[in-house]
Each structure stands twice: as C-alpha cells, then as structure tokens.
Image (cartoon, rainbow, N blue to C red):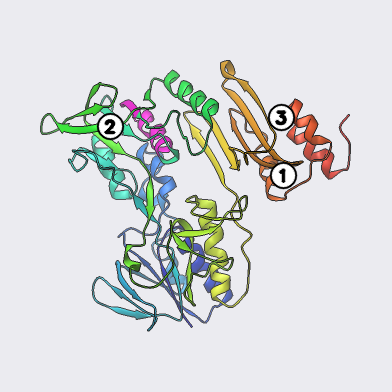
Amino acid sequence: MQHIIIGTGPAGVIAAETLKKVAPDSQITLIGSEPEPPYSRMAIPYYLVEQIGEEGTWLRDGENHFAELGIKRITDRVSGVDTTSQTLTLENGEPLRWDRLLIASGSHPVKPPIPGIDLPQVQSCWTLEDARQIAARAQPGANVVLMGAGFIGCIILEALHNRGVNLTVIETGDRMVPRMLNEKAGNLLKSWTQSKGVTVHTSTSVEAIEASSSEQVNVRLSNGETLPADLVISATGVRPNTDFLNDTGIEIRSGIVIDDTMQSSIDNIFAAGDVAEGYDFSTGMHSVQAIQPTAADHGRIAALNMAGITTAHRGSVNMNVLDTLGLITTSFGLWAGSGDGDETELYNPQSYKYINLQFDGDRLIGASTAGMTNHVGVIRGLIQNRTRLGPWKDRLIKDPTRLMEAWVGICENISPG
C-alpha cells in the first residue's frame, strides 16, 4: 500500500508515524516544500528570543528520524493532483502514484491589499526563513509595527517585546484577539499589554506603507498618525493551501470538506490540519480550526482510517490558550454563547482577572478567561463531555469561579451546599 502525505507540519508528521506503527509494511512518502526538517511554527517565537536554536523548532530530534523509521521524505512542491489516475506531480516534474493520499498542506499568511505591502521592510512571521529576516531587523531599539493582534499576532508580540524593540500593534477590530475574546476580555488584554510598554491601537487600520529611506518606512494609519518603522510585520490571518487542487473535483469551501473519517469528497483522499474543514464539536457544522491540537488529532485519525482501521472523529472542541507578556487568556467552545442560553461572568479589571461562562440548558457550552488558569482542564472536560450540571449550574451562575467544586460534586454526586 502506497501512502503519500502532502505537508510536514504536525498533522502530516503524526499521520506518517501513526501509519508506520499500524501499517508497518506500507510505503509512506512525506512531502514538504521547505528545506528544513519538519518544524513547529509555534516554536518560532522561542527562536526569535534566542531561547532555542533552529534545531529546537524541529518536531522530531535528528535529521535522520524519518529515514530510520522507513518514511521517505521529499523536499518539493506539489504542482498538481490527478484524482482519476491517483497520481500527483511535483514541481520538478516527477509523478508519484498513491493508494491513499493525505493532504495536510497547511495554510499561508494572507497579504492584505495595502499599498507598500511588498516593500522589503514588510515581513510575515510564518516560516523559519521569515524568522531569520525578522531577527536581522528587530534589533533592540528598532521601531517595529505589528499589523494584527489576533492569536498569531499576540504570540509574535511577546517575542518582539522580549527583543527590546519599540513596538506598536495595529488591530482593525475593537479589541485584541477578537476571534477569541469578547469586548471585556479583549480590552483587558489591551490594557495589560499597554502596561508593559507596548503601544496598541484598536479599531485602526494601516492605510499605506511608504518608503522613507533605503532602510525605513512610514506607516500611515486610519487615525491620521504616521509611524516611522524599521520593520513592519503582517499577521492579519492565514488561508488554507488549496490552490494546487483546482479542477480536481475535491469539494473545497473554507478548506477541504472532510467527513468523520477525515476523507474528502473523493475516495482515498483524506485531509487534516489547517487545510481541512471538519466537524466542530460545539456546532455540529463544518469549519476550519487552525490550531495545533486539532491538527494532531486530525493526523492520527486520518492515518488510522487510511490503514483501514475505521475511526470516527467526534469533532474538534474550539480551544485557545494564549500567554501574552505573562497574562494568560483562554477561550473554549462557544465562548460567545449560542444566542439564547444563560451566561455569567466575573470581571475585575484592577487585578486583570475575568471569567465568562456560557450555558445551554444545564450544560456548559463555552467559556473565556483572563488571568485565571486553574479552571482550564475542568472547563474543557465539562464542555467536551457535555456534562449535565444540574443544581450546580445555579451555583456557577452566582460564582463562576467554583468550577472545580462543581466538577468534584458532579463526579461524586454531591449536591451544592
């Protein structure tokens, strides 16, 4: 059996290793377009602050890891896929035939339509090569403008701050991390970030980036300000890598649509990770969840089904945990609520603490927190298990911090006192 995996991120790597474990006699080929050994993009900020070298970003120790497992690794791009002949073509012209194909090609940064976005002082932060370019320009005291205060932007933010640059963050939304936090939590994070010496503009956009010298640019904002910058980093979102699948007949919406076995609309073709549009546990609808836990889960389940071990995916629980300059924020499930359920919150801006719980009947369906980490495991467990809270719901409405007490009470069948 010939298995081919496109993509060397967590989904692709875990799928390859799982296949080798459950189908040791199969032929496995792992294709990636970057010259480095498979690495974690989530480790790039640690590389930027020199806590690790490039080898510290690698997903597996040693350059020979995959060869030792008997997994063939190819460094090239896939230029086309023929679903009829079950053959793909690499940019170097080499055709490869598969029995089972896994597309785990990930995503790429979205380049906003801003004049000057292609100037050499403007950089994404997505690949190791991007990180090398940023490290060269983001020297202590340099003026750096970061476009985007979403999840990825905030991870980059911390690394830049720790490099000692003069940092300004521009976010078009009315708060930081608007796809993860509500107005109170997002603006609490903004206040915290500003207290650490970072300038943050929300409800603001970059209108143009203009060269002022061979080394610097001016960044013109919608609020009328113009900022001098040695470096501009664009972190305004990502999009699944699906262009090479045009005219293949594979159903693609926001990503490759998959069923609960990770199979696409074409037999023997599977998808996993950022490129896949799979089941959302909370909504029952399809969505792309570009987070590493989902990628790892997708990769494992796809491999099992490719090997003939039927395994159903229950859907991904939306889960984000973000550490921004020491303030940890989280969101789980339907953190903005279902529209007609109950909710409760505790808000203490002076202490940078916040918790919000969302309910559907007597079940917890979503939550978000700031500055409160001791409930993370309980929140995920209650949502993922669809636990009925019974009388504990009223107790949580009155005091949402009593989640651990509610969990223990439910497990041991103890009523709230």
Q: Circle 2: is it few (<14), some (14-19), or many (20+) Cα within 10 Å? A: many
Q: Is 223 a magenta residue?
A: no
On the image, the x and y values in percent for residue 358 come to 66, 37
Residue at image point 87% right, 43% down = 412
Quarter assignment of residue 46: top left
Cα distance between the residues tagged 1 and 2: 41 Å
- Residue 94: tell me if it is visible: yes
Front residue of 48 and 65: 48
Q: Farthest top residue?
A: 350
Instruction: Give the secondary structure at mark 1.
Output: helix
| Whether residue 148 is situated above or below residue 354 in the rendered picture | below
The residue under the point 52% across, 82% down is 25
Q: Nearer the viewer, mark 1 or mark 2?
A: 2
Is there CB contact under 8 Å for labels 3 and 1? no
Task: Please report whichever mark, 3 or 1, sits nearer to the chain's N-terminal start.
Answer: 1
Q: Mark 3 is on which residue type?
A: Pro
Q: Which mark is residue 400?
A: 3
Neighbour tally class for label 3: few under 14, some 14-19, many 20 plus, Cα within 10 Å: many
Could you say where residue 100 lies in the image, as x and y percent from the top left?
A: 47, 77
In terms of sequence position, does the residue under pointer 1 or pointer 2 come before the other? Answer: 2
**Residue picked out by circle 2:** 206
User: What is the x, y in percent for residue 73?
Assistant: 37, 70
Amino acid type for the residue under numbered disc 2: Val
The residue where tag 1 is placed is 382
Q: Residues within 10 Å of mark 1 (few under 14, many from 20)?
A: some
**Residue for point 68% across, 49% down:** 384
**Depicted 269 relative to depicted 110: above or below:** below
The range drawn in magenta is 153-169
Check disc 1 and give the amino acid type. Leu
Label 3 SS? loop
Q: Is label 2 in a helix, a strand or a loop?
A: strand
Residue at far left of view:
214
